[in-house]
Amino acid sequence: MVVPSSGQAGVRGLPALVAFFATVVPLVAAAAPCGQVQVWGSGGTVPKYLEPPAGLDGVKDVKSGKDAIIALKADGTLAAWGDDGGAGVLAAAAKQTGVKQLAYNGGKRAGVVKTDGSVEIFGMCVGDFGACSPPAGLKDVVSLASVNEGTMFAAVTADGKLHAWGWMMGDLNGTGNGETGFVRLAGGHNYLVGVKADGSTVGWSNAPWLVKAPEGGKFKDVTGDGSYGYMVYITPEGKAVAWGGAKFLSGQGDGPVVSTTKANVDHIMALATLANAVLAVRDDGTVVG
């Protein structure tokens, strides 16, 4: 992975960070404090179609799929570019207004939480397994997650209640609709994790060990990649705790489940994951990996 400059202090001032796979090389997109988006990747190569649109600014968050990027702007609109395979996600995103949170990790659908607390799912809704249809009466949403590239969505409402809909295959079919006490959700390939107000977590996955957090841990956020068998949790102190196959955590692939704390990395406020790497944004704006 090549970042714009060398060393652990390679990039400063990035409040939002997302890592993703383009067609050829792993790439990272980040929103800087000036509201602009930076994209970089292996060998310094960024495909032309993934370069941010000219003049794009006012960005406060950015999400991506395999070949597409959606950015949430401070004015509640979305900017979208790349290639969504004809799903219509990017065109629909460009029409959105009044957005306060974005949920997207690729595929044919994305979701947003509006400033009034309502949820809207957009993109290709033919054969969507119900993913485009939030539960009737869903309101006051404070956190939204996309699972398995938009085939499933989950939301937490202001009362801490979990609501899930769409294609909940396998063990994800056991997702705890109606459970309470949640403040934040994280979703991705083959997993959904809810963070509770007390820092405990509850997870659902077709690989149950993947979402079983390190015993006794308290966390404020979580991310990961179910395809490659690992999760990374952020403690209230800003430490990163990686959880997954022992061989993966040592850079050797799959293996027994263990946890490890990344040495000399603290004050973390955001994480992004690749197949074989984790990047963290610290509260001083530096990016480490």
Image (cartoon, grey):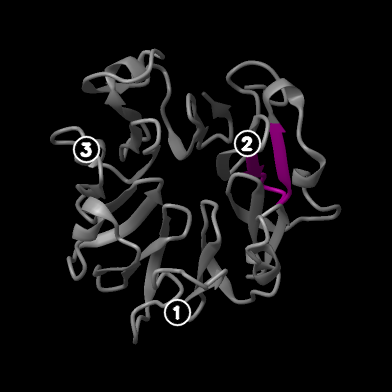
Residue that label 2 marks: 28
Q: Is residue 274 left or right of residue 236?
A: right
Q: Secondary structure at mark 2?
A: strand
Three-letter amino acid code at the position of disc 1: Ser
Identify the residue shown where x is 39% and y is 31%: 228
Identify the residue shown where x is 81% and y is 53%: 53
Q: Earlier in the sequence, mark 2 or mark 1?
A: 2
Residue that label 1 marks: 118
Counting every numbered tag in the picture gives 3
> Label 3 to label 2, Cα distance in Å?
26 Å
Q: Is residue 107 left or right of residue 168?
A: right
Residue 243: in magenta span = no
Residue stretch in magenta: 28-40
Three-letter amino acid code at the position of disc 3: Ala
Q: Secondary structure at mark 3?
A: loop
Residue that label 3 marks: 213
Identify the residue shown where x is 36% and y is 38%: 226
